[in-house]
Image: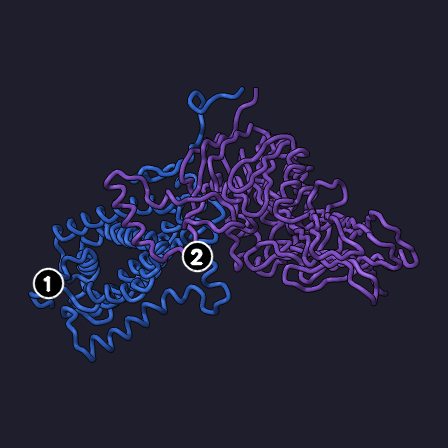
Amino acid sequence: MSATPDNMRWTRVIEPQRGLLSVPLGEIWQYRDLLLLLVRRDFVALYKQTILGPIWFVIQPVLMMIVFTIVFGNIANISTDGMPHAVFYLAGITMWTFFAEAFTKTSETFITNAAIFGKVYFPRVIVPLSVVLSGLLKFAVQFTILLCFVAYFVATTEIVRPNWAVLLLPLLLLMMGVLGLSLGMIISAMTTKYRDLRFLMQFGVQLLMYATPIIYPVSSLPDAYRPFILANPITPIVETFRFAFIGRGDFDPMHLAYSGGVIVTLLIIATVIFNQIEKNFMDTV
Amino acid sequence: MSTPALRVEDVSKMYRLGEVGTGSLSHDLNRAWARLRGRPDPFAKVGVVNDRTAEGSGNFVWALRDINFQVNEGDIVGIVGRNGAGKSTLLKLLSRVTAPTEGRIFVNGRIASLLEVGTGFHPDLTGRENIFLNGAILGMSKQEIRARFDEIVEFSGCAKYIDTPVKRYSSGMHVRLAFAVAAHLETDILIVDEVLAVGDAEFQQRCLGKMQDLSRSSRRTVLFVSHNMAAVRQLCPNSILMDQGTVVNRGETGRIIEQYMDSGIRNSKSRVIFSEKSATSQAKMTEASVYSGNSNTHAVRSTDQEINIVTKYEIRKPIRNKRLNISLFDALGNLLFTTSDFHESKKIEYRMGLYESLLTIPAHLLNTGKYKLTFCLDIPNELVLHLAEEALFFEISDFAFDQTGITLNAMGEITSPFGLIHPKLKWNVRGLI
């Protein structure tokens, strides 16, 4: 008769649970083409049948910048650390959009892809990864706009001065991406069971923006609030980003290291929860 | 000795019934608490066998229970069973869409599934883009897809529309394209679930041929789930019969299909012995049974089978002009027709004794569904001799695929054709001028 499973080599064993911290890196590599195709799909499908197409990537942050300049800068008169309003807000918005998109889209992973996930297996983590990668591309476009503004203000004013810290950009993006991914994965795994979280998400991200120095600089904070805003792991990333590209911001390596610690912890938690949910979520969605 | 490609060991799968998502937090807390104290899962206990006709007492149901089997490399194995037998759940476990609750599955080689149609097709993308996307979802690399692209397009027969967004495709083209991609996968084990439901007869034959090829030439293993017995018979030398979440039998396909057909009787009442109660002193129906064409043990399963209804009755006093009426109702109680043996027996003088009337409903007339039969023995315009309402019922569960008109709903599931009946009619199409 045939061999028993013990003395024969099987290429795969499907079991009820797998290790909580295991990340199927090999599989992700195998499916790298899928990852790229999903990113491509996001782009192509999103703007098919729209007139302006990818220009929307540019219109969004610029409109937001204009509104912020009028409302927060000119009407509410919130400090921008002596920086030109436009470039101050745009720097914040560019970074924030990257995070918020990664976060919200990742958090919808299971719900929006239930149809595909229900029929076919591939490492589920491919989908959130593709979301973050798409976000990165979008960031690149918006970042270019920011650079144009920075260049303009460097030429016309004395205060906007990018410096050596621009070299930290890859690190900042990695941190922001991983943070959005981790938080999104945690939420997405939980929304498969507890749908309430979806409602929380809708305004939670909005509230989070106000808890992050996007429309105000850390330096203008009253001392009473300061520790809370600094406890937000996004704060050091945004501040460092501003410091690097416009030359003013609250840059402190310790704060950045703290952020890194929080992000790694969240990533570990996210991996555990995601692994738990991944295998059985089809039964609960 | 052949090498095993797949081995399923003691696999069970439990589902929660009812409204999923409510009260689950408290369940989770209860579970966590039980686990902390080293107790077994408090909700696993109430699992009951997957019998949908009887209301389960627990909130949990075992969709699969202790499944064991092995499939060797290059085999094509059919999986048959009634709706709810656990076939699709099994395939979902094998394709890793969901994980088993207990047990282990050993796999040798790459596994790819074709559960339902058009997996991951994006309506806005063109056929070309979707071939790449779909292929990647199924686990192919870009290079592999590119190498086979022409073959795929040719097989699907969609070459003309390859740069059209798939939302403009007909459902048939959709499936052709999807199947074409999957059939050209570089995979060792292919799982196929009811994909043949759409597409015309010619394409279905092409699919069956392709699957046969796959297993013969490249030693690929195919698991094939279908309600289409003809296709299972054609494709699979061996089959597995499932019922209520367990493997009932496994063996040569012909034998398995026979057993499956017989098991359908349980779901219907195909034979009845009439009681004395409603009979009269003049006549009494003794028994009636319903069976499909070939054999009197086979329940009626498919729309391409003849349905025979035999009624036996006893004439207790000489009668002239007796008449046997049979009425067919669908599950909702619509009367489809009433028929009688009257015209054939007009002037016959019935002496005392036993008689039998056989009614044959031709194949390709009824739609799929559940049907009820009412019997009435009478003397026209005079007297009801014996009335038995809803005495028999039977179900036609499988739609015969050699007819057209199969429809898919928005979810891609097969639905019955519209209408109370679905007769096979003659069409003639010709060009004018």
Which residue is pictured at 36% across the width and 69% down the height? Answer: A59
Give the numbered dot on residue A42: 2
Q: Find the residue positioned furthest to the left.
A: A223
The amino acid at mark 2 is Asp
**Where, quadrant-wise, is the N terminus of chain B in this rendering?**
top right
Name the spot of residue B247 as percent of width and height, x first.
Answer: 54, 36
Can residue A276 be spotted in the picture? Answer: yes
- Chain A, hue in figure: blue
**What is the CA distance from the residue labelled 1 to the residue labelled 2?**
39 Å
> Which of the chains is purple?
B
Counting the numbered discs, the total is: 2
Which percent across, then down, holds residue A49? 50, 66
**Residue in front for this viewpoint, B100 or A189:** B100
Residue linked to disc 1: A226
Q: Is residue B291 left or right of residue B151?
A: right
Give the residue displayed 69% in from the left and 51% down from the top: B275
Q: Quadrant of residue B422?
A: bottom right
Given the image, what chain letter belongs to the residue carrying mark 1?
A
Q: Residues within 10 Å of mark 2 (few under 14, many from 20)?
A: some
Within 10 angstroms of label 1, few (less than 14), some, or many (20 or more) residues? few
**Are the residues under marks 1 and 2 on the same chain?**
yes
